[in-house]
Image: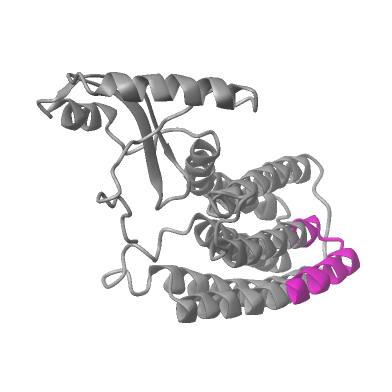
Amino acid sequence: MHTEDLKNKKTILFITIVLNLIIVVSQIIAGIYSHSIALITDAVHNFQDVVSLIIAYIAIIFMVKKPTPKMTFGYKRAESLAGFVNSAVLIGAILLIIITGIERLIFPQPVESLVVIIVGGIAFIVNSVSAYLLGFHSHSHDDHHHHNHGEDLNIKAAYLHLFSDAVISLGVVLGGIAMYFFSVYWVDPVLSIIFSLYILKETIPVFKKSLRILMEGVPEEFNNDLVLKELKSFPDVLDIHDIHIWALSSKDIYLTGHIIVNDKEISKLENLIKQIEEKLSRFGINHITIQFETKNFNCEIKH
């Protein structure tokens, strides 16, 4: 990932964090003043955005950190962890909004609708701009550097947060307008519930994808059988077992496995593997995949 690109991402995230904090404070004050549960709910959801954006910001910092002797994979999993926390928190927030909406349908209460319209409108504008910045940035340059852009789970989750909040703020505004002119207090929770269900549909795939990575699952779109077919197509390969395929991030896929070959020389190596396994077992290491190579062979794949 380019340093300049990272700087841009960090700057955009930082701006959206500050803007969202301002919204949260103003919505809570306005919500208390106007007796609007919708505004307070939106403020709570907005605060989730702030948390998610901070996580995304931290994840970007961690993603570029190099592997260390204690963190041999580097910090690439920070991306998935951030995506998982973001989407999990958002799903929780959406469920709270749905519950609040149902409560307000049963017990409607009058609110200062003009305050709701103004503050909700400001929140809608700020969230829309923030979502546009993040969404535009995570999809820009896709044609040139498809490998580096648009795939970041944490940016996608943060973008979904902002987009969903813009939609909810719009619901709050429309509800406020309806309440102002017609005193129909049920409109506000109905819109909130409808929008919440849509956001839930958008968020669950991000949640599932990041959870799959954290659980060492094979990437969803991955075809195991084709990989095994490719491996077995070599004349020297008799059989394959203990195959593990997992993703470290949305861009790094790993494979380890044991391949049975027809070769007399390998018995020496097998003996060495047994000795290595015995030696390492006292450290609690119980799954070992060793690749043997001569000093003339270079397996380093340049990223």
Quadrant position of residue 273: top left
As rendered, which of 188 and 208 lies closer to the eye?
A: 208
Residue 232 location (% of width, % of height) = 17, 25
Residue 32 located within the stretch drawn in magenta: yes
Q: How many dots with numbers? A: 0
Residue 229 location (% of width, % of height) = 17, 27
Seen at 71% across and 62% down, the residue is 46
Tell me the colour scheme of the image: one colour
Quadrant position of residue 224: top left
Residue 10 location (% of width, % of height) = 58, 75
As rendered, which of 236 and 9 lies closer to the eye?
A: 236
| Residue 298 in view (yes/no) | yes
Seen at 66% across and 60% down, the residue is 55
| Residue 114 in view (yes/no) | no
Quadrant position of residue 103: top right
Image quadrant occupied by the N terminus: bottom left
The outermost residue toward the right is 33
* Image: magenta residue range: 21-41
In the picture provided, is 57 more to the left or to the right than 28?
A: left
Residue 241 located within the stretch drawn in magenta: no
Image quadrant occupied by the C terminus: bottom left
- Is 88 placed above or below 278 here? below
Residue 104 location (% of width, % of height) = 77, 46
In the picture provided, is 296 more to the left or to the right than 109?
A: left
- Is 144 placed above or below 97 here? below
Seen at 72% across and 60% down, the residue is 51
Q: Which is the main secondary structure of the residues drawn in magenta?
A: helix
As rendered, which of 233 and 269 lies closer to the eye?
A: 269
